[in-house]
Amino acid sequence: MLTLTADQIFLWLSSLFWPFVRISAMMLASPVFGARMMPVRIRIVLAMVISALSIPLLPPVPMVDLISFDAAGILFQQIIIGVSMGVIVQMVFQALVVAGEAIANGMGLGFARMVDPANGVQVPVISQFLVVMATLLFVILNGHLLLIQLVIRSFEILPISSSGLSLPGFMAVVKWATQMFIGGLLIALPAVTALLVVNISMGVITRAAPQLNIFAVGFPLMILLGFVFLAATLPSMMAHFTKLLMASFEYINYVMGLR
């Protein structure tokens, strides 16, 4: 007859609980997994399944009382590590929101907004279009699988303990937030530059022909040309997004290794 002692049950629960905390924190902050459209129950079940399957691959977990100050410190560190990994990738998607905002303002569609179902906030329709395209590309490139692979690997670099992510690592995560603005401007630069040239041209035409009703001609023309430029520059936008996404995965390894 199979018998289990209290220590064996506690060890198994600890082996499942600590990875579950880090993995679920990563899912909560990351794109796709953390989207509001994904039910919380599915997210919890998925985190538990991944945690259970990864137990044989992980280093031994510390034997601490789950109701203690040591356990609270470990819990805090696992949440910080998981959220940091998810936020680094999430910033890449937010760069597209910044890019869409710049393009929409140049087209005259800054007022056209809709609720982003992933985050529950209002964003320009151009931003939402770019985010949807990037999400499809993220899944096609198996970005969700790479993210799971990275969080499993993080247990080797940062084992479950109260030490966790260092201060330089935390500051590196904060520094990565600049990529949201830099990447967004670089993604939107071709389309915004073309729209700026069109705006300057319309201004010159207005000065040359004052009788021309710029409001009747300029706004529809800007919207039409904006969509043309958006379609023409979309491949380069997604290529830059892919480079930024792969850089975020490499940056996660860099942050996890800082001491």
Image: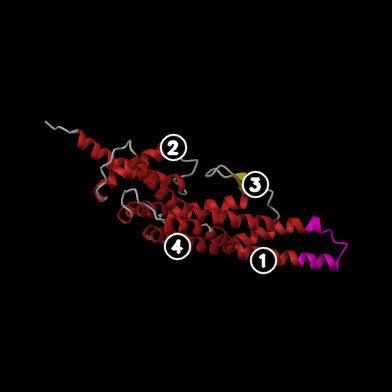
Disc with the residue nearer the chain's start (1 vs 2): 2
Labels 1 and 2 touching (C-beta < 8 A):
no
Q: Secondary structure at mark 2?
A: helix
Q: Which mark is residue 247?
A: 4
Cα distance, mark 3 to mark 1? 22 Å
Three-letter residue code for mark 3: Arg
- At label 4, counting other C-alpha atoms closer than 10 Å, the crowd grade (few under 14, some 14-19, many 20 or more) is some
Residue 38, x across and y down, in percent: 46, 40
Three-letter residue code for mark 2: Val
Residue 210, x across and y down, in percent: 87, 64
Residue shown at 83% from the left, 64% from the top: 206
Three-letter residue code for mark 4: Ala
**Which residue is tagged 3?**
113
Q: Please identify, in this view, whether the residue under mark 3 or under mark 4 is nearer the observer.
A: 4
Q: Secondary structure at mark 3?
A: strand
Labels 2 and 4 touching (C-beta < 8 A):
no
Disc with the residue nearer the chain's start (3 vs 1): 3
**Which residue is tagged 1?**
194
Cα distance, mark 2 to mark 4? 29 Å
Q: Secondary structure at mark 1?
A: helix
Q: Dividing the image into 4 quarters, which one contains the N terminus? A: top left
Residue 139, x across and y down, in percent: 44, 52
- At label 2, counting other C-alpha atoms closer than 10 Å, the crowd grade (few under 14, some 14-19, many 20 or more) is some
Three-letter residue code for mark 1: Ala
Q: Please identify, in this view, whether the residue under mark 2 or under mark 3 is nearer the observer.
A: 2
Disc with the residue nearer the chain's start (3 vs 4): 3
Q: Residue furthest front?
A: 69
The magenta stretch is: 201-217
**Which residue is tagged 2?**
40
Q: Residue furthest right?
A: 211
